[in-house]
Image: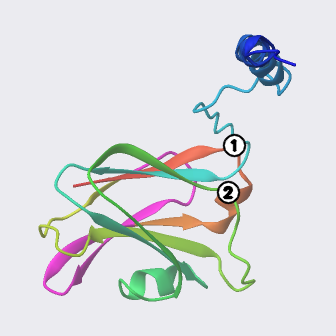
Amino acid sequence: MRKGFGVLFFIIAVFFIAAPFAFYIARTKTGSQVKGVADAGYSQGFSVVVNSSQGTWDLYQYGCADLDECKKALFSGKKLSMTSGGEVSSYTLPFIKAPDAQDIEYVKFFSKPGWGSAQRTFYVSEGKFTGLETVEFEAEGKKVNALIVPVKAFTASHFVAGTLSD
């Protein structure tokens, strides 16, 4: 009646020897994707690059019916989105889907310092695409530069529309 611990010890040893092999086999069958690596590979649309060495920032996106509406005032048009971030170098934001509103012909992008961040001006370097414009506004006693992109840029081959840097 006395079998001892031999059988129990054998079962535990087999488990600890077989478990790493089972794990290895299961992991190799899941595919050949490399974790942590991404290829943007956008075929259409454009990107806006933000460089901020002095603190947080907010990137605003406004849709306008025409170029005059975009140039009228900094906050003219329909607010589409706002993206925020911290200190970054060459942070690329892709825009691959045009706004749903049919009356939007231009999209205005501008960046301002984020909440609690040092006041500063973001300068715009525009990319090479027909119809891109940069406009300077005076808002709240500060100079703000904006990049205006025509909606047709969403269907063009992917390019960098502009860079906003402080």
Residue at screen point 60% across, 51% down: 46
Above or below, comparing residue 15 to residue 151 in the picture: above
Q: Nearer the viewer, residue 118 or 161?
A: 118
Q: Secondary structure at mark 2?
A: loop
Image disc number at residue 96: 2
Q: Earlier in the sequence, mark 1 or mark 2?
A: 1
What secondary structure predominates along the stretch shown in magenta? strand
Within the magenta stretch, is there residue 139? yes
Q: Which mark is residue 152?
A: none
User: Which residue is found at the position 50% from the left and 59% from the top?
Assistant: 132
144 versus 30 height, above or below = below
- Give the left or right position of residue 126, taking residue 136 as reference: right
Q: Are marks 1 and 2 in contact (CB under 8 Å)?
A: yes
Q: Looking at the picture, how far across and down is residue 108, in whole percent?
A: 48, 72
Q: Which residues are magenta?
A: 126-146
| Res 86 quadrant in image | bottom left
Amino acid at pointer 1: Tyr
- Residue at label 1? 42
Toward which corner of the image does residue 64 lie, by quadrant?
bottom right
Residue under the point 87% across and 19% down: 1
Residue 145 visible at all: no
Q: Nearer the viewer, residue 23 or 60?
A: 23
In the rendered image, residue 98, in percent from the top left (x then y), is placed at 70, 68
Residue extending farthest to the front is: 1
**Residue 95 visible in the snapshot:** yes
Across and down, in percent, residue 118 comes to: 12, 67
